[in-house]
Amino acid sequence: MEWEVFEAESGSAFITTDSPVSLYNSEVPPPAEAGLAFAGTFVFFPVSSHFALLMRHPEYRKDSNISAMTVLPDPPNVDSRLSITHGVVWKQRIVNNFNWKMMQFSDRLIVGESKYILEACTSS
């Protein structure tokens, strides 16, 4: 999977939950989690309140005709370079949407840096 590290814009922040790493696929509505082998499955991992790691299959990003539910073959078991991009700042609306999804995957615990951040992710 490709790794992308996103920063929350000033005034917004990522939440953390008791399900800190979640699998999201637009074809499998939360709180259900899709399998990792599906092309359209993303791995959500908030690293801190200001940074989140998003992992996705490059095949899905490169081919707009591939279904989110296409099962991808196991990757070859070889050493290779890992693609990591960073430096993109997500607008508050995108951060709130990410947080809403993370909240849907939680069991009982949601942590945010302020009451405002927690309220913002419930209204997305």
Image: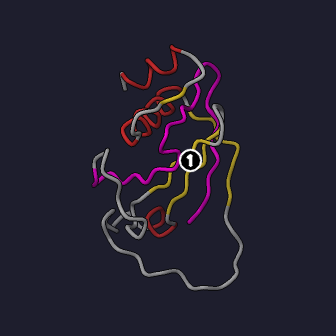
Q: Is residue 123 left or right of residue 57?
A: left
Q: Quadrant of residue 31?
A: top left
| Residue 104, image quadrant | top left
Q: Looking at the figure, which quarter contains the N terminus?
A: bottom right
Q: Which residues are magenta?
A: 1-28
The residue located at (49%, 40%) in the rendering is 18
Residue 112 pos. (x, y %): 55, 25
**Left or right of 111 on screen, residue 86:** right
Horizontal and vertical percent for residue 70? 32, 71
Image coords of residue 24 (percent x, y): 40, 51
Magenta stretch: includes residue 14? yes
Callout 1: SS: strand
Residue position for label 1? 45
Q: Quadrant of residue 15?
A: top right
Q: Residue at x 63, y 35 (%)?
A: 89
* Percent position of residue 6, x then y: 62, 42
**40 or 99, nearer to the observer:** 99
